[in-house]
Amino acid sequence: MTFAERCGVHGAPREAAVREVLERVRGAGVDLVRIAWCDVHGVLRGKTLVASALERALHDGIGFVSTLMLKDSADRTALPVFERGGTAALPGFGQANNLLLLPDPASFSLLPWAPGNGWLRAEPFFTDGTPVPLDTRGVLQRALARLADAGFTMMCGLEVEFHVYRLRGDAAHVDPMLAAWPGPAPAVDLIHPGYALLSEAGFDAAEDALRIVKQTADGLGLPLSSLEVEFGPSQLEAVFDATDALTAADNMVRFRNGVRMALRRAGYHATFMCRPPFPNIMSSGWHLHQSLLRRTDGRNAFMRDAPAPGSGPLDAAHTLTDTGEHYLAGLLAHARSMAVLCTPTTNGFARFRPNALAPQSVLWGRDNRGAMLRVLGGPGDGATRIENRLGEPAANPYLYIASQVFAGLDGVARGLRAPPATESPYGSEAERLPAGLADALAAMRADPVMVDGIGPGLAHVFTRIKESELARHAEAPDGDEFMRREYFGRI
């Protein structure tokens, strides 16, 4: 019996998919295949196989060290794996033991920026064939299964801001005297000066880089809709058509990973950190559009045919169905505890400031870009949706989207009602979002909906990882240099 069979995932359809992948590899002249898995930070990791080793890996998996699931943002193992009891809260972990990655043949693609390279997404398993509960894609899959049990599917659209710079000098040269843990960030120049939102001249200046972004997205089969020059220096935005939630999360992981590698080969540096450590920078956000569809008929579960009797424009019931209002209220009720899953770095919380097109308080608004939650659409509009503006582009997509499901479903289950929409998102006395990573982490740990949702084991690991990051940030003699090495050069 193969390992895939022991895991309970292999049968005739998967075997047919395996045969198809092997044929595609031969036909395309692929000699290297990257087997990738998404870590808790949303970064792809894995191993690269020669083509002749692929068939065995598809049936029996490939080993990888379990500490990869316990790394902080500088790649330091955040739990004492070699101490007695150091991983007692994590059955199956300890002593840097082996886990297995099992590739999904249905995920195969060719990498448009790397000729001769194929790619497969993989799922981590324990050696006994059981899934590893710390896998963040699995967390989202479990969240979506809960949603299905409640009678819904989820659609998500992505608006992703990020920064692209031109690499300065010989980017391949890294002075070994500057090596540290983590390593030095690259020296860069701007590709556009900023402060000319949606300027055609700005787009023209950035077009070479933007064309690489487009070609990468197209080559990966991603539903890219538009590319825009954002307000800040060297800041850009990519907008994607709506897809089902799991596909949206997969797309975000592959977009970030692919764009960074493709641009680096062309002499650019892309970063998805919120606030690159330079003067006069503008923060980047990741705005997540979401709606639920009824499983029975595919109808948008947030869309009203007409406003509720007696409601006004500031009432949720004027725009949203009862289900939509309950979901909105759930997002508000758990806003502080979901914040660390949407903005998981010490860098990202500086974005929450007045009049910055970013949220500051736990509020919703009707087409209001200063509110945390922006409700769009209206009666009869099949695109009626809620936009969450809480996230940063460095967030793990699976945890970001899963947190919405946990919060929204709790609101639906409890029949929560939303307060009136804000017309003053920065002047309100409403509850504030967490002031920093430590505050946000404490809020998550205190919320059983979030802890039970992602799982106690992952909550434990995530907490230890973020505490490690906070400690190193507090001890850093130069905060900007910490940001450069920890985030700018790595995410």
Image: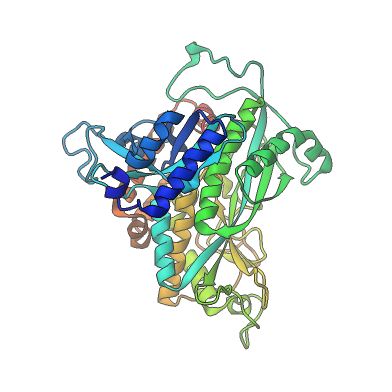
Residue 230 falls left or right of residue 404? right
Looking at the image, which residue is at 45% across and 43% down? 19
Q: How many marks on residues?
A: 0
**Where does the image place residue 259, in percent across and percent down from the top left?**
61, 37
Given residues 296 and 344, the one toward you in this image is 296
294 lies above or below 196: below
Q: Residue furthest left?
A: 84
Residue 287 falls left or right of residue 148? right
**Where does the image place residue 310, in percent across and percent down from the top left?**
63, 87
Residue 464 falls left or right of residue 92? right
Mark yes or no: residue 467 visible.
no
Q: Quadrant of residue 275?
A: top right
Given residues 277 and 302, the one toward you in this image is 302
**Where does the image place residue 72, in percent across and percent down from the top left?**
39, 36
Mark yes or no: residue 63 visible.
yes
Q: Residue furthest bottom?
A: 309
Q: Quadrant of residue 255?
A: top right
Given residues 300 and 345, the one toward you in this image is 300
468 lies above or below 185: below
Q: How is the image coloured?
A: rainbow
Looking at the image, which residue is at 66% across and 59% down? 369
224 lies above or below 487: below
Looking at the image, which residue is at 45% across and 63% down? 405
**Where does the image place residue 197, in percent across and percent down from the top left?**
77, 46
| Quadrant that contains the N terminus | top left
Given residues 132 and 101, the one toward you in this image is 101
